[in-house]
Image: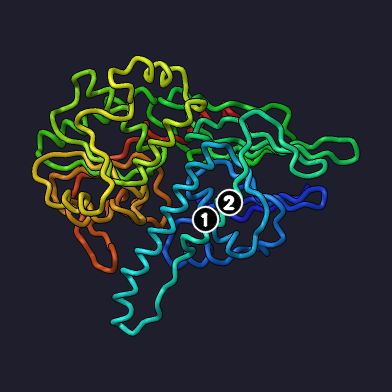
Amino acid sequence: MKIQFWGAARTVTGSMHLVEANGHRILLDCGIFHGRRKEAYERNRNLPFDARSIDAVVLSHAHIDHSGNLPTLVRSGYRGKIFCTGATKDLASLLLADSAHIQESDVRRVNRRRKKQGKTLFEPLYETDDVEATVERFTTVPYDRSRSIFDGISVRLVDAGHMLGSASVVVDVEVGGRRRRLLFSGDIGRRGLPILRDPRTVGDADYVIMESTYGNRLHEPADEAHDYLLETVQTCCDDGGKLLIPSFAVGRTQELAYRLNQMWEAGELPPFNVYIDTPLGVRTTEVYRRHPECFDREMLSRLESDSDGDPLGFEKLTYIKKADDSRKLNDLEGPAVIIAPSGMCEGGRILHHLIHHGGSERTTILFVGYQAEGTLGRRILEGADEARIYGDTFPIRARIRRAGAYSAHADRDELIRWL
């Protein structure tokens, strides 16, 4: 067995690991690398191997830093299967289509400026047609069921508790009557988070590839997430300002909706509106409702007992689909919560809200997820007083807060416990 690390090694994002065994080449994840724009573009476009030489892909979960470069792989000649859970297939289909759409629209916007300046025009990393060709290659595998993919090679997916459909990947290789087991953790979730089951562990592994995003940090206890969010919301309400939450449309957005629903039903939430500004978030929430096999007991109980049968929605929560309705939030008067992607402020509708509201001292920007080095989110989190967006510079005078209790990644002690 030979393993090469082509991403998410000595850095975060761009997960991609190549396993060679029994004459076959298996790729574990094929994610987009996030970082400084030029470096990220080059790394993502230029694969470090011949895509046609890969025999199979196993996808741990749908987050773009694990799945987002699959269309580049297919565009470059890959013709094999992509194995994943059913929920991951449904979510990745949405996320990849959204990624292509954002790239196409952002490139059009930037190229209008570059054309006037006589500069070389950019191209998107991939387009919608590439995503459609990629989705055709998804092959679903249920949790905890071994699937033979080649002679002497089988894979099993085990619930990682990180996001809907997320899995750790067990690769068993038989050589000369002996078994060698490789365990790829994927992203490991936290115990006690709402909606999803806790991460499961796997025994008897010979080799482990393990994430360590927060290997040097301890999170706030998960049960503090409710109080921290409520206090932040109340502060914005008292100031009459906006609360901007850059959030991944998958996972974090649904958890925020779930917790805000709890506050509303308990009578704790101040009387102002909450907007989830992403059509992807709407479609993602629909996918969640289709996959109760991923839910923990609390979520299943809430589905049965919730007054309207929907723990991911409530009276003051509005899901925004249309761009025109999103633009109306630019001139919104009074306090409000606006949740929008992308989680690292590298694209999507959150950029427009930063342009229109980030310069106000009454605004709070609450980060609820990891901010990779080189991203706009990381620069804002570290205190940048301005942001360069679509080629222009805008002031950032908002209060900056970080909620570690909302992380879907295990921290140092939780990683050690899993290992």
Q: Nearer the viewer, residue 306 or 249?
A: 306
Q: Position of residue 235 (x, y in %)?
A: 15, 33
Q: Position of residue 198 (x, y in %)?
A: 51, 25
Image-quadrant location for residue 407: top left
Classify residue 344 as left or right of residue 22.
left
What residue do we see at 55% from left, 32% from top? 160
Classify residue 114 as left or right of residue 411.
left
What residue do we see at 19% from left, 53% from top? 327
Picture quarter with the C terminus: top right
The answer to whether any part of residue 171 appears in the image is yes
Packing grade of label 1 (10 A; few <14, some 14-19, many >=20) is some
Which mark, by number, is residue 132? 1
Packing grade of label 2 (10 A; few <14, some 14-19, many >=20) is few
Q: Are marks 1 and 2 in contact (CB under 8 Å)?
A: yes
Q: How is the image coloured?
A: rainbow
What residue do we see at 13% from left, 44% from top? 362
Which mark, by number, is residue 136? 2
Q: CA distance from mark 1 to mark 2?
A: 7 Å
Which mark, by number, is residue 249? none
Classify residue 112 as left or right of residue 185.
left
- Disc 2 marks which amino acid? Glu
Residue 218, compared with residue 14, is above or below; it is above
Image-quadrant location for residue 225: top left
- Disc 1 marks which amino acid? Glu
Q: Position of residue 216 (x, y in %)?
A: 49, 38
Q: Position of residue 352 (x, y in %)?
A: 24, 55
Residue that protrudes farthest toward the bottom in the picture: 118
- Looking at the rendered structure, the secondary structure element under dot 2 is loop
Q: How many marks?
A: 2
- Looking at the rendered structure, the secondary structure element under dot 1 is helix
